Amino acid sequence: MTERIAIYPGSFDPPTLGHLDLIQRAARMFDHLIVAVAVNDVKQALFSVEEREQMLREITATFPNVEVSSFEGLTVHFARERGAIALVRGLRVVSDFEFELSMALTNQKLDPGIDTVCLMPSEPYIFLSSRGVKEITRFGGDTAPFLPPEVSARLRKRLREKG
Ligand code: ADP
């Protein structure tokens, strides 16, 4: 049987325990999972693509079937190039739904051979976002419940540097 490959695309600026929870569960569903940082010139990122890839590699090091990569352009083109059959996305709150539905339908039109699989986060991460953890860190809050320790330290450092 051919290997079932999925792509988990996102900004991951920075990766959170919510992302990691999704990675862990998607890695059980597919033979191979490619976590891919989307290079997006429009969204102003705090971390470079290389830094985000590095953090993702560190926090997924114990998952044998997870690979970290990055891509430019359309997600479905990258998925096709890598022989993937699915895109994994997270659905946290109702407000995610409209956006994810329109993206999934657009991607389906672009390439009907690639399906979108949406996973709900585990309960502690339902309101967690990269944007939220930046705010918590900026105001000196404890991010231990939301971020892998390697990421917490880097985020604190980066926000200090930025002033
Ligand atoms: P994007 O800019 O593509 O939304 P993100 O890094 O913010 O990139 O998110 C990537 C994917 O991970 C999205 O599908 C998002 O809904 C999902 N996601 C982010 N945070 C969580 C979380 N706490 N629980 C579940 N899914 C999440």
Image (spheres, rainbow, N blue to C red):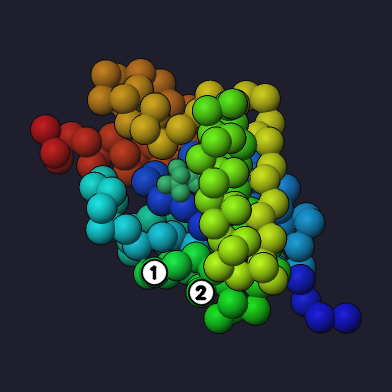
Q: Nearer the viewer, residue 110 or 66?
A: 110
Per the image, label 2 sits on a secondary structure element best described as: helix
Could you say where residue 44 lies in the image, as x and y percent from the top left? Answer: 24, 47
Q: Quadrant of residue 134?
A: top left
Q: Is mark 2 within 8 Å of ligand 1?
A: no
Q: Is mark 1 within 8 Å of ligand 1?
A: no
* Residue located 65% across and 34% down the image: 121
Q: Residue furthest left?
A: 163
Return the residue at label 2. Answer: 77
Residue 57 marker: none
Return the residue at label 1. Answer: 73
Q: Residue furthest right?
A: 1
Q: Nearer the viewer, residue 18 or 85?
A: 85
Question: Taking the image as drawn, is residue 160 in sight?
Answer: yes
Q: Amino acid at mark 2?
A: His
Per the image, label 1 sits on a secondary structure element best described as: loop
Residue 42 located left or right of residue 55: left
Q: Nearer the viewer, residue 60 or 25?
A: 25
Establish if 159 lies above or below 114.
Answer: above
CB contact under 8 Å: marks 2 and 1: yes
